[in-house]
Image (spheres, rainbow, N blue to C red):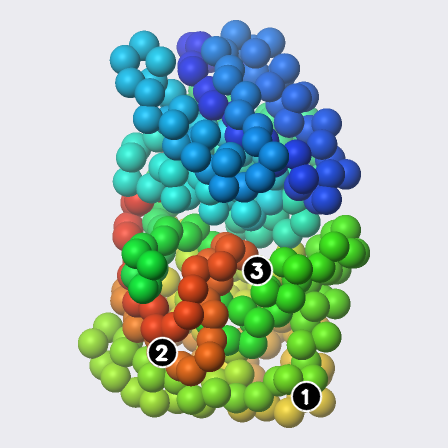
């Protein structure tokens, strides 16, 4: 599909899927260059260095200004792109090659075929980017953007364990981390302020979602819409380990939403506070509660 040449930054996570798909990044660079685009590949040995290098590349002005960013990796790379481009007007595309790929899944980008994912990217480069919302988290360390889901309960503990694990090298890592953390499962007391209304609730899991899934396809908020100007507040009340194990398989199909312990509501802003909880957004560590989360409509431009 012919399109006018663009200056594209391609950010590559060489350790995506624990390095098992390290050839994907160079293939993407070669494919876009063959299409006639001016492509700059950015790869660094660690995430912090890669983030800095991407921001530096995007900050270039004049003739060197980037028309688009493409990230090759999983949801960690999506987090990098979201935080680098939110409210800048610079669109970004995703070539999924990570373990979870939840944002790509929510956007309808093929997960198992590089050629098909490139076809989606090429179509969007020709037709133009779509606009979606983002969540912005205000916390003690500043502010952080997310495109998918912020976790602030048992789900965040699972995320922390999964990020420390080196095996298995796939989406099942999140499931194994969840089962390992299950021995510590307990409801916590949360102070929530939802669009100005304060309440104290008991919850085992709590999340604020812009996208439908986390953890490699766990469809926690199956009715979430990426561009409706709202976030979905997901809460699971107190439950035993046995009941959790009965509930868990339903999360992959989205059939858990009718259970009496599950509550999902549409919100614009929510403040979450509880003791000894670390918040995660798009699988990346944000910091300890409290956090305040707001939706920013139209903050992201996506090549999908």
Task: Relative to 230, say whether 178 is above or below.
Answer: below
Q: Secondary structure at mark 1?
A: helix
Label 2, label 3: how far apart the Cα atoms are: 21 Å
* Mark nearer the N terminus (3 vs 1): 3
Q: Nearer the viewer, mark 2 or mark 3?
A: 2
* Mark nearer the N terminus (2 vs 1): 1
Residue 190 appears in the figure: yes
Q: Nearer the viewer, residue 235 or 254?
A: 235
Percent across and percent down for residue 42 are 53, 25
Q: How many marks?
A: 3
Name which residue lies at 73% across and 38% down: 19
Report whether 277 appears left or right of 255.
left
User: Around disc 3, counting alpha carbons within 10 Å, would you say few (fewer than 14), some (14 to 19), or many (20 or more)?
Assistant: many
Name which residue lies at 30% across and 87% down: 199
Which disc number belongs to residue 241? 1
Task: State which quarter of the image contains the N terminus.
Answer: top right
Q: Which residue is mark 2?
A: 273
């Amino acid at each position: 599909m012919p399109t006018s040449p663009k200056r594209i930054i391609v950010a590559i996570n060489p350790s995506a899927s624990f390095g098992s798909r390290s050839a994907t990044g160079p293939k993407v660079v070669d494919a876009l260059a063959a299409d006639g685009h001016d492509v700059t590949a950015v790869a660094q040995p660690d995430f912090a260095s890669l983030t800095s290098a991407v921001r530096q590349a995007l900050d270039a002005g004049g003739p060197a200004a980037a028309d688009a960013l493409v990230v090759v990796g999983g949801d960690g790379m999506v987090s990098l792109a979201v935080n680098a481009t939110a409210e800048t007007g610079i669109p970004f595309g995703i070539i999924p090659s990570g373990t979870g790929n939840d944002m790509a899944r929510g956007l309808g980008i093929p997960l198992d075929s590089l050629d098909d994912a490139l076809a989606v990217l090429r179509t969007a480069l020709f037709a133009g980017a779509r606009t979606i919302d983002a969540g912005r988290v205000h916390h003690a360390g500043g502010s952080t953007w997310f495109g998918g889901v912020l976790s602030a309960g048992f789900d965040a503990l699972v995320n922390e364990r999964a990020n420390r694990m080196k095996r298995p090298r796939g989406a099942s890592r999140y499931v194994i981390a969840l089962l390992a953390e299950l021995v510590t499962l307990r409801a916590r007391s949360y102070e929530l302020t939802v669009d100005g209304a304060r309440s104290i609730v008991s919850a085992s899991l709590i999340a604020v979602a812009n996208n439908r899934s986390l953890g490699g396809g766990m469809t926690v908020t199956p009715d979430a819409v990426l561009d409706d100007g709202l976030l979905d507040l997901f809460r699971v009340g107190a439950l035993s380990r046995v009941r959790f194990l009965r509930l868990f398989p339903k999360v992959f199909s989205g059939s858990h939403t009718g259970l009496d312990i599950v509550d999902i509501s549409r919100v614009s802003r929510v403040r979450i506070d509880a003791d000894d909880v670390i918040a995660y957004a798009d699988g990346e560590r944000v910091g300890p509660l409290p956090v305040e989360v707001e939706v920013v409509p139209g903050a992201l431009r996506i090549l999908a």
